[in-house]
Image: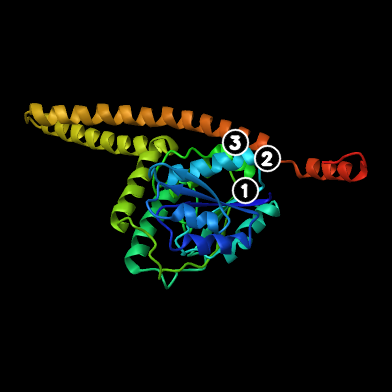
Amino acid sequence: MTIIAILPAYNEEVSIGSMVLHTKQHVDHVLVIDDGSTDRTSEMAKLAGAEVIRHPKNRGKGKALKTGFEHVEKNGCKVVITMDCDGQHNPDDIRKLVSPILKGEADMVNGSRYLNGNDENTPFYRRIGQNILDKATNLNAGLKITDTQSGFRAFARHTFPAFRFKSNGLAIESEMLMDAANAGLRIKEVGISVRYDVDSSSENPIKHGFGVLANVIHDMELNRPLIYFTVPGLILSIIGLTMGLSFLRIFYYGGGLYFGPTLLMILFVLIGTFMMFTGIILDAMSKLINENKKKVIILSTPDPEVEMNAKHDSFNNPWNTS
């Protein structure tokens, strides 16, 4: 099978059937991960012709995608599509997402609502939160993605080892971009259409936004330790040194030194220095880990010339029945 679509689903009995049928028009196989639904999501997906894997209880979108990727990796494919099954995404856009991968132009393709400017249909409060999450994710990953929270994406098979699937919930979108950037994957964006007239999410958007932002900031600890540790440490050290110079000036002109402010100045300098060195050490470790990830991806990337020679040999060998 060349293209497999993974649809994580939670209580989507209303839309899952039509999404599976529509998606099947553009892919070779549809895999639905029923993440502990309490309705007839699994039943409707099976009736529509999808393969279904069911979690006994709700574990979050990240775990659902992990289950899907692990299953697909065992069974083989060339491209994996991930998309939401609440009706927001249009399966007709699948051909645009898989094209760069099949042409060898990208390893991962991100479907963007904002590639050609702001989507006029996006609610105002959503776009404000989206901008904050885009900037935080791009800062962490070192990318320039216009829609970091898109769940409509395409992945080449050889990219699978790059992803950790550490996040359980909707923060998985940002995490996958960070992992892809750290592994040196070629990421491309294509424009997609989105509907907002469907019941898209059961989670409060404000709670969701703060959850994703907290996850991105936490991930900076290893992804961007210079920003997470060194920059705040440098600021603390500068504050401490400035206080120290001020105290020396006061002491020089005959003033006294107070125990509390002096102790605070020393703490600022010591903690700031410790944080700076911690960030530098973690940055070196992070670069080493990411280099190893890149080597794994390179080793697992198919060589087009080898594939072409294999096809040529298979064609010229009449005894080859594979």
Q: What amino acid is labelled 3 in the image?
A: Lys
Residue 216 placed where, x, y %?
38, 45
Task: Indicate which label's residue lies in the foreground, 3 or 2.
Answer: 2
Q: Left or right: where does residue 81 sit relative to residue 78?
A: left
Q: Nearer the viewer, residue 32 or 160?
A: 32
Is residue 183 shown to the viewer in this render? no
Q: Residues within 10 Å of mark 3 (few under 14, many from 20)?
A: many
Question: Which residue is located at x 51 percent, y 61 percent?
Answer: 17
Q: How is the image coloured?
A: rainbow
Q: Residues within 10 Å of mark 2 (few under 14, many from 20)?
A: some
- Secondary structure at badge 1 equals loop
* Residue that label 3 marks: 294
* Residue that label 2 marks: 301
Residue 241 placed where, x, y %?
24, 33
* Residue that label 1 marks: 107
Q: Which mark is residue 50?
A: none
Q: Left or right: where does residue 68 sit relative to residue 99?
A: left
The answer to the question of whether label 2 and label 1 lie on touching residues, with beta carbons closer than 8 A, is yes
Q: Quadrant of residue 306?
A: top right
Distance, label 2 to label 1, CA atoms, is: 9 Å
Q: Earlier in the sequence, mark 3 or mark 1?
A: 1
- Secondary structure at badge 2 equals loop
